[in-house]
Image (tube, rainbow, N blue to C red):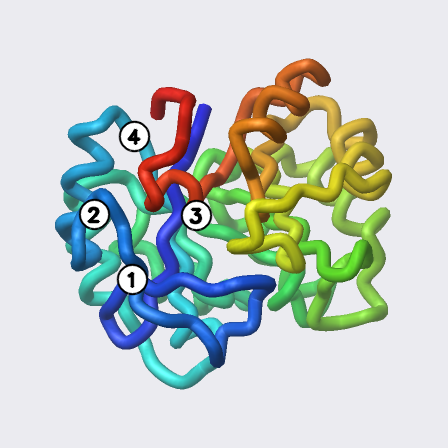
Amino acid sequence: MIIPVIDLMNGDCVSGKSGNRSTYTHLESVYGDCPLDVAHNLREDGARALYVADLDRIEKVGDNSDIISQINSVIPVVLDNGISTISDIEYDENICSYYILATETMKSMDSVKQILKKTPSKRIVISIDIKNNQLLIANNEIKLDDIISLINIYKPRAIIILNISQVGTKQQDNNELLYKIIEKTPHTPHYIAGGITNESISDYKRDNIDNFLIGTILHEGKLENKL
């Protein structure tokens, strides 16, 4: 399954490379010029869900919740907006279909456990964020094995393995960390993200990996696979 990706800043779809958010610019997409047009056209093209990152809320400089709620009425939104506490989940309850709990914003194990205990597992997606071949996490006392253990206990809907260093680069580094995560979480679906190309999709499929989050080549109109 392929899930399209859009990033939002100031109510606009934006694009950039390697997670350097201060350099992001307006997204030129074959699917439209504004977020709602992109959402409608992706749905018409066969997309079953849309990954939305609210970069303003992640950076705590703004909030795109109104437009995200409108998008979610068009196509189910898998939302990354910096969740770190159960109150963040409650805030998002009516604006998206699925919540992303990302390592980038995990501040404490207690908060992570509380979220996983109180939130229906079918609505939770864990994003394991990688930068420069290392786990990107808000609290360095939380280790990858801690996250893997919680995944195996609570069995969220899916795991995203996001290589932030590769975002927007159309390059993919199949590092050992990615395959370690897949091997140690065998009962949860995995989505690979960051720098995905048509060639890397073919390579991953040879390893029986079939789920991807895709932005750049999709919006350029170069994706060879069907949504």
- Mark positioned earlier in the residue sequence (4 or 1): 1
Q: CA distance from mark 1 to mark 2?
A: 9 Å
Q: Amino acid at mark 4?
A: Ala
Point out the frontmost of discs 3 and 1. 3
Q: Amino acid at mark 1?
A: Cys
- Residue behind mark 4: 47
Camera-side residue: 8 or 77? 8
Rendered residue at 72%/36% (across/down): 153
Q: Would residue 5 be found to the left or right of residue 213 on screen?
A: left
User: Dots 1 and 2: beta carbons under 8 Å?
Assistant: yes
- Residue behind mark 2: 38
Quadrant holding the C terminus: top left
- Mark positioned earlier in the residue sequence (1 or 2): 1
The image quadrant of residue 57 is bottom left
Residue 227 appears in the rendering: yes
Q: CA distance from mark 4 to mark 2?
A: 11 Å
Q: Amino acid at mark 2?
A: Val
Structural crowding at the residue carrying mark 4, measured as other residues with C-alpha within 10 Å and reported as few (<14), some (14–19) or many (≥20): some
Q: Would residue 86 be found to the left or right of residue 72 on screen?
A: right
